[in-house]
Image (spheres, rainbow, N blue to C red):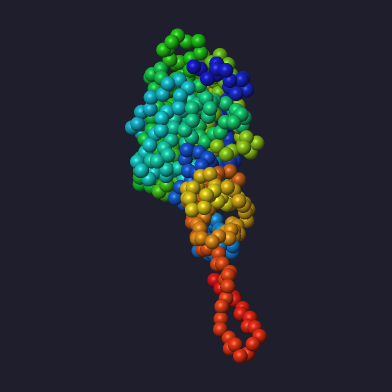
C-alpha cells in the first residue's frame, strides 16, 4: 500500500527535507523503555551504608550513578563526497515495510545520542522508505514519511534518515543492503547502509511496474574504535535523488534527510524544511553530523523496594518509595521491628537528561532481629539485711 494514499491525514503525509542543521536532541530511550539499552559505560548500583542493620534502625540507600562519557547531541559536519562499494548483505523489502533485525558481529557498538547500541545484540532495522532505525516497531506505528517536527500522536522516533520518502524497493532494479567494515583506511569502523538505484513509488502505475525515477544514497555510521572520525558520527552520501516526475501530490516528491532520537520533543527541533526535490534532482551531495552538545548526565534517581520481604523481584514490580534529584542520590530506610531476621531488596532507576532510564540490579539488605526486653531478673541477697534489692537491666546490641 502506498503510505501517502493511506488513511493517514494530509498533515501526516507531509515529509520534509532537512538540508541545514541537525536536530537538537535530548537523549535516547534505554533500559526498560525501548528494545535497545544503555550498555557498558553508564553504571548504576545500589548500596547500603550499613548491612546487616538492626531491625528498627536506619541505613542509607544510595544509587551510585556513573554516566557514560558521551554527548547526547550532534553538530553538523558535512564530509567530502565518497560513495563506498560496500553492499555485502542484501535486505529484501516490500512496499512500506521495516526489515527484521539486522545483526553485525558481536561487540560492534554504535553510540547514538548518548546511547551505546550493541549492533551485534540489539541490532538495527532498515525501512523501505529510506531510513535506519534502532527501534523494533512496524512502520505504521513508528515512522512514515512526514515532517519530523510533527510526529503523529504517540509516535516516537529513533532513526537515521538517508532519504525518507515513498519508495518501492520490491519492484527491482535496485538493491537495499548493509555491510560492516572494520579498519576502513586503517582508522575507522563503519557500518554502511545503502539504497542503490531504488525506485520511487509509482502512483497510478500498472502492478509491478517500477518508477523510472530513483535514488542512490548511502549512510555511514562510525562505530566505537574509530580514530579518524569520532565514534557516533553519521554521514549521508547522495549519489543521486531524481526528481519524481510521476508524483501526484507534493509529498511524493519530498524527502527527509537527518537524524531524530526517540526522546526528541518536536518543539526542540531546528532546520526542518519541507522542500521538494528540485527538477534537476540532487547529485553528489553530502550531509554529516558529529557527536556534540550536552554530556550524558543524571536527572534523578528513584528508589524501589521489592514488595515481599525475602523475595528478590529482580527489578520488576517494586514500590517507588523515594526520589532524589541531587547527587549523591540517597534514601534513608529503617526496617520494621521484627523478632526474626529478615531481608529486603531494593533497586534504583536513574533518569538521564530527563528522558532515558537505566535500572540497577537489586541489592539485598539484611536486617537482624530486634532484641527482646528481659521478662524477669533473679538474684541472691543476705536475708539478714532485710529490705529489698533492685536490679537494672541494660539491653545491648
Work out whether 128 lies above or below 39.
above
Viewer-proximal residue among 127 and 164: 127
Viewer-proximal residue among 84 and 221: 221
Query: Where residue 304 appears, x then y in whole percent?
Result: 56, 50
The residue that appears at 38% across and 24% down in the rendered structure is: 92
Query: Where residue 195 appears, x then y in whole percent?
Result: 42, 27
Q: Residue 93 sits in which quadrant?
A: top left
The residue that appears at 53% across and 27% down in the rendered structure is: 141
The residue that appears at 58% across and 86% down in the rendered structure is: 381
* Count of numbered circles on the image: 0
Q: For the view shown, which residue lies furthest in the left direction?
A: 88
Q: For the view shown, which residue lies furthest in the bottom direction?
A: 384
Work out whether 152 lies above or below 231.
above
Residue 261 seen by the camera? yes
Viewer-proximal residue among 131 and 327: 327
Q: Please state if 209 lies on the left or on the right of 278 as rendered.
A: left
Residue 162 seen by the camera? no
Query: Where residue 1 appears, x then y in whole percent?
Result: 49, 17
Viewer-proximal residue among 66 and 146: 66
Quarter of the rendering occupied by the C terminus: bottom right
Work out whether 389 lies above or below 319.
below
Query: Where residue 212 appears, x then y in whole percent?
Result: 44, 16
Q: For the view shown, which residue lies furthest in the top direction?
A: 206
Amino acid at each position: 500500500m502506498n503510505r501517502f494514499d493511506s488513511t493517514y491525514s494530509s498533515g501526516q503525509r507531509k515529509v520534509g527535507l532537512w538540508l541545514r542543521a541537525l536536530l537538537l536532541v535530548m537523549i535516547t530511550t534505554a533500559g526498560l523503555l525501548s528494545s535497545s539499552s544503555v550498555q557498558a559505560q553508564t553504571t548504576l548500583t545500589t548500596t547500603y551504608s550499613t548491612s546487616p542493620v538492626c531491625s528498627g534502625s536506619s541505613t542509607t540507600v544510595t544509587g551510585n550513578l556513573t554516566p557514560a562519557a558521551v554527548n547526547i547531541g550532534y553538530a553538523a559536519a558535512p564530509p567530502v563526497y565518497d560513495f563506498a562499494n560496500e553492499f555485502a548483505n542484501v535486505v529484501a523489502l516490500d512496499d512500506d515495510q521495516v526489515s527484521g533485525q539486522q545483526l553485525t558481529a558481536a561487540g560492534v557498538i554504535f553510540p547514538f545520542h548518548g546511547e551505546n547500541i550493541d549492533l551485534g545484540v540489539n541490532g538495527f532495522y532498515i525501512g523501505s522508505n529510506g531510513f535506519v532505525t534502532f527501534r523494533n516497531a512496524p512502520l505504521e506505528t513508528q515512522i512514515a514519511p512526514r515532517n519530523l517536527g510533527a510526529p503523529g500522536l504517540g509516535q516516537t522516533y529513533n532513526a537515521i534518515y538517508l532519504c525518507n520518502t515513498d519508495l518501492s524497493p520490491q519492484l527491482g532494479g535496485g538493491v537495499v543492503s548493509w555491510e560492516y567494515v572494520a579498519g576502513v583506511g586503517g582508522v575507522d569502523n563503519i557500518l554502511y547502509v545503502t539504497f542503490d538505484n531504488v525506485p520511487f513509488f509509482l502512483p497510478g502505475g500498472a502492478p509491478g511496474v517500477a518508477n523510472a525515477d530513483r535514488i542512490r544514497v548511502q549512510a555511514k555510521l562510525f562505530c566505537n574504535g574509530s580514530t579518524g572520525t569520532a565514534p557516533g558520527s553519521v554521514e549521508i552520501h547522495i549519489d543521486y535523488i531524481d526528481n519524481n516526475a510521476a508524483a501526484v501530490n507534493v509529498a511524493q516528491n519530498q524527502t527527509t534527510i537527518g537524524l531524530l532520537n526517540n526522546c526528541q520533543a518536536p518543539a526542540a527541533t531546528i532546520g526542518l524544511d519541507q522542500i521538494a526535490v528540485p527538477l534537476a534532482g540532487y547529485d553528489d551531495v553530502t550531509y554529516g553530523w558529529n557527536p556534540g552538545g550536552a554530556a550524558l548526565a543524571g536527572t534523578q534517581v528513584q528508589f524501589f523496594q521489592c514488595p515481599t520481604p525475602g523475595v528478590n523481584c529482580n527489578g520488576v514490580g517494586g514500590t517507588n518509595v523515594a526520589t532524589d534529584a541531587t547527587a549523591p542520590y540517597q534514601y534513608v530506610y529503617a526496617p520494621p521491628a521484627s523478632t526474626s531476621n529478615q531481608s529486603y531488596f531494593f533497586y534504583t532507576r536513574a533518569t538521564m537528561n530527563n528522558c532515558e532510564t537505566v535500572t540497577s540490579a537489586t541489592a539485598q539488605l539484611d536486617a537482624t532481629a530486634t532484641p527482646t526486653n528481659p521478662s524477669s531478673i533473679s538474684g541472691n541477697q543476705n536475708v539478714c539485711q532485710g529490705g529489698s534489692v533492685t536490679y537494672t537491666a541494660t539491653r545491648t546490641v
